[in-house]
Image (cartoon, helix red, strand yellow):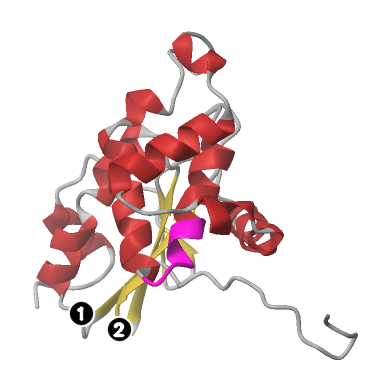
Amino acid sequence: MADSTTPIPTLIPDPLEWGHGRKILEVFLEPTCPYSGRAFGKLDALLALAGEDRLTIRIRLQPQPWHMFTPVTTRAILAASTTAGGREAARKVMAAIYAHRDEFEPVDHCRGPLLDKAPAELLARIEELSGFALRAAFEDSALTQPVKWQARYARQNGIHVSPSFMVDGLLVPDMSSGDEVEAWLKKIGLSAG
């Protein structure tokens, strides 16, 4: 039995960060938004073009209330980041959700058969699609703080839509998921590495 001096174990999500350059791009993504999914799909190409030694990409999760199951998908992604697979597990969970978006977002955000799904059913489907056992981490109350942090961080930085992009702490309002990777590189102030 733990006494008051025994530290309580906590889950610590692996930062959703790739590259190690001085230029920092923070990408705010909503886990079931199709535009966020399009941006997510370009991040590897951007990092390869810029060079890992010149650019750091940090994914921030941007929950939006009109996406009905965002709390479940956001928590599942962060749960994955606490597993032995860390950020790569989280990336695979994100990729699985984006690839099967219709299974996690009701028709017009408000109707259809998904309304009959319970959060546990959605989590089981994410586990099935991604190949990761997430339930234990998902149900750990220690994960609530990192989930809240994601929402607060976006709000504190004036992020209201997804995807949104910040370069070195400054919002880049004209960056879009529809841009080519080369245009992104120019907007963040880098040339091809």
Choose top left, top right, bottom left or bottom right for residue 147.
Answer: bottom right
Q: Is residue 23 left or right of residue 111?
A: left
Q: Which type of secondary structure does the marked residue at label 2 adopt?
A: loop
Q: Amino acid at mark 2?
A: His
Residue 135 picture location, percent across and down: 53, 50
Q: Residue at x 20, y 45 (%)?
A: 179
User: Magenta part of the protein: which range?
Assistant: 79-84
Q: Residue at x 23, y 58 (%)?
A: 43
Does the segment drawn in magenta span residue 141?
no
Q: Amino acid at mark 1?
A: Glu
Rendered view: 53 above or below 13: below
Q: Residue at x 63, y 60 (%)?
A: 143
Quarter of the rendering occupied by the C terminus = bottom left
Task: Pick the residue in front: 5 or 149.
Answer: 5
Task: Pick the residue in front: 89 or 110.
Answer: 89
Q: Which residue is mark 1?
A: 52
Q: Is residue 16 left or right of residue 142?
A: left
Task: Pick the residue in front: 16 or 80.
Answer: 80
Is mark 1 in CB contact (under 8 Å) with mark 2?
yes
* Residue at mark 1 to residue at mark 2: CA–CA distance: 6 Å
Q: Which type of secondary structure does the marked residue at label 1 adopt?
A: loop
Residue furthest toward the front?
Answer: 1
Q: Is residue 152 visible?
A: no
Residue 67 picture location, percent across and down: 52, 29
Q: Which mark is residue 20?
A: 2
Task: Pick the residue in front: 142 or 56.
Answer: 142
Q: Earlier in the sequence, mark 1 or mark 2?
A: 2
Mark 2, Cα crowd under 10 Å, few <14 / some 14-19 / many 20+, is some
